Amino acid sequence: MTPVNDIALALGVLAVALAWPVPALLARASWPARAAVLALALWQSIALAGGISMIGSLLLFGLQPFGDDLWSRIVSAFGSILSGPLPPQASQLNTFALSAAVLLTVHLILNLALTSVRSRRQRHRHRELLGLLSSPLPDAPSTRVIDHPAPAAYCLPGARSITVLSEGMIELLTPGQLEAVIAHEHAHLRQKHHLLLDAFRSWKRALPWFPIATRAQDAVALLVEMLADDQARRVSGDAVLAEAIELVDATGSAGAVLGAPKDSRTPAERRTALVSREARLLEPPAPISPAARAFVVVVCAALVLVPPILVLTS
């Protein structure tokens, strides 16, 4: 059997690759706009495999002195922690790696839970404020209108999901364009995009010192907007939705919101996202080839399956 040290080293190398160069290359690639669903699957696979590889590498190295296979090592390490002593071959480096694996696991899980709870609370408070400061759109009780001059459209997921439009948006767009915008927001709600965004916000908050975490969050946010565009274009057509985006962009209002990536850091980045979506609608890119599509699927499957298999069979 391959020595545990070799597997721990391989997982460590994979974790480093998935923490920086691989997502950096993906964030700069042009093909994700041509296959948004596959690109989202790849981003999720990278995040999941990176976390498992990082934790698995530390765990396997830390447990190495405690036995001959993974489960016996875990039992032995747990017994040593409770009653001692540590095996004579266990070094401070092994202890540090094992502690780091446990702490990192707890840190990531807690950040995911806290991000989810905070998001739900924020949406609940926002929904309560909207109940006081907005009115239902005629013939559309799940759509609320706020009295604000800047064009804005967004959705609030939950048990009672709602779509929010501003008076500025209603005055700016034609009925057909407004229908396209509403269809876009409904696509977010149906496809539960908020859950995916919460996961990547959690990654950013857990590892704020990784610049790639911010780039990953922005890339994923843009991809979910493109997915919602793909649903809306089936209702209204490419040109109508593109015109709505162009009109919102042309207002130049700092408060304008039309599905721009959540948590974008600057107005310039929000505008860049709108321009990218508009260009994609006006000049739809050719889909990626079946061979490229199959390759991405295989890579996603390998990323999801290989790291846990290596950890569990060590």
Image (cartoon, rainbow, N blue to C red):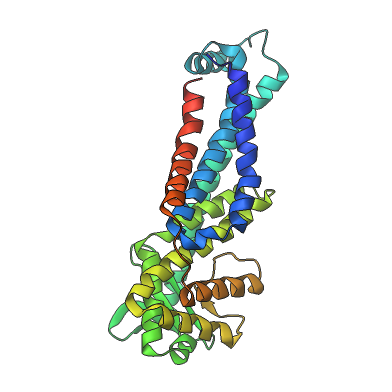
Residue 32 lies, with reference to residue 136, above or below; the image says: above
- Residue 172 spot, x, y in % from top left: 47, 90
Q: Residue at x 44, y 49 (%)?
A: 291
- Residue 171 spot, x, y in % from top left: 45, 92
Residue 237 lies, with reference to residue 265, above or below; the image says: below
Residue 117 makes an appearance in the image: no
Q: Is residue 129 left or right of residue 27?
A: left
Residue 5 or 162: which is nearer the viewer? 5
Residue 90 makes an appearance in the image: yes
Residue 6 lies, with reference to residue 105, above or below; the image says: above
Q: How many marks?
A: 0
- Residue 236 spot, x, y in % from top left: 35, 79
Q: Residue at x 60, y 42 (%)?
A: 18
Residue 139 or 1: which is nearer the viewer? 1
Which image quarter: residue 301?
top left
- Residue 26 spot, x, y in % from top left: 58, 53
Q: Residue at x 49, y 57 (%)?
A: 197
Q: Residue furthest right?
A: 92
Q: Residue furthest left?
A: 139
